[in-house]
Amino acid sequence: AQSVTQLGSHVSVSEGALVLLRCNYSSSVPPYLFWYVQYPNQGLQLLLKYTSAATLVKGINGFEAEFKKSETSFHLTKPSAHMSDAAEYFCAVSDFSGANNLFFGTGTRLTVIP
Amino acid sequence: DADVTQTPRNRITKTGKRIMLECSQTKGHDRMYWYRQDPGLGLRLIYYSFDVKDINKGEISDGYSVSRQAQAKFSLSLESAIPNQTALYFCATCANTGELFFGEGSRLTVL
């Protein structure tokens, strides 16, 4: 079975500071991993995904994530936070068992302090 | 126009009423999903459909039913709404790359 754990339901950073959002996964097969972002009153949109190619994945808006098999982690980072990054971020793992279902973490709300 | 459109965006209803949430898409994707979002719980899968003849239960299907009227349309019904079904509901389609495309959500309040 697949699952993800997001450490920290709320993260606050100052504008210009490093953003680090943590995600650990559990999977019985090689995982496909995703980060989605949800802005207020909107649906989720894809930030980036890992599908067994390069372990360092670059996404939109300057975000990137590194797949570390030994640590079962897929943490999301951005070198310098912008006010527009304030949103809720979800890590997800796919079982790709044929159902292509994504199992989502509980989300991390990012606040950016001016 | 949005690629995945949900109606209604907001609905307040009473316990015991039947409610239908509708979803239509212009992405041309075969796979469609209904998720429920609750604070602190993330998104949980209710039902999913691979095509009009293939509908499957997700992890929290009790109390819900779905209908896939066409490739582009996938509706979610609550036959007899109860207060703990108060939540934000999302429809999504899935590309062959595995990426999900979400609608803007339907906020349902059951009194």
Image: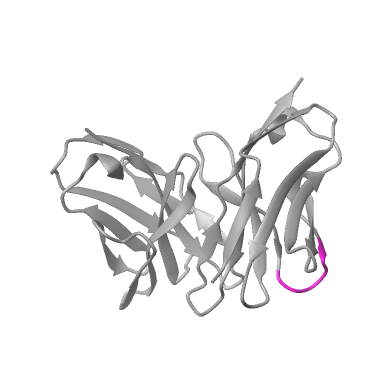
Q: Position of residue B19 (x, y in %)?
A: 21, 47
Is residue A114 or residue B82 the one in the foreground?
B82
**Magenta stretch?**
A51-56
Q: Position of residue A43 (x, y in %)?
A: 51, 45
Count of marks placed on residues: 0
Magenta span contains residue A25: no
Task: Say whether residue B19 is left or right of residue A64.
Answer: left
Q: Position of residue B10 (x, y in %)?
A: 33, 36
A53 versus A35 height, above or below: below
Is residue B64 or residue B60 the one in the foreground?
B60
Regarding residue B99, the answer to whether it shows in the image is no
A64 versus A56 height, above or below: above
Q: Residue at x 42, y 62 (%)?
A: B33
A51 versus B2 height, above or below: below
Regarding residue A15, the answer to whether it shows in the image is yes
Task: Say whether residue A75 is left or right of residue A100.
Answer: right
Q: Colour scheme used in the picture?
A: one colour
Give the quarter of the figure containing the C terminus of chain B. Answer: top left
Task: Say whether residue B21 is left or right of residue B96.
Answer: left
Q: Residue at x 33, y 62 (%)?
A: B73
Residue B50 found in image quarter: bottom left
Q: Residue at x 66, y 71 (%)?
A: A31
Is residue A76 or residue A58 the one in the foreground?
A76
Q: Residue at x 79, y 52 (%)?
A: A64
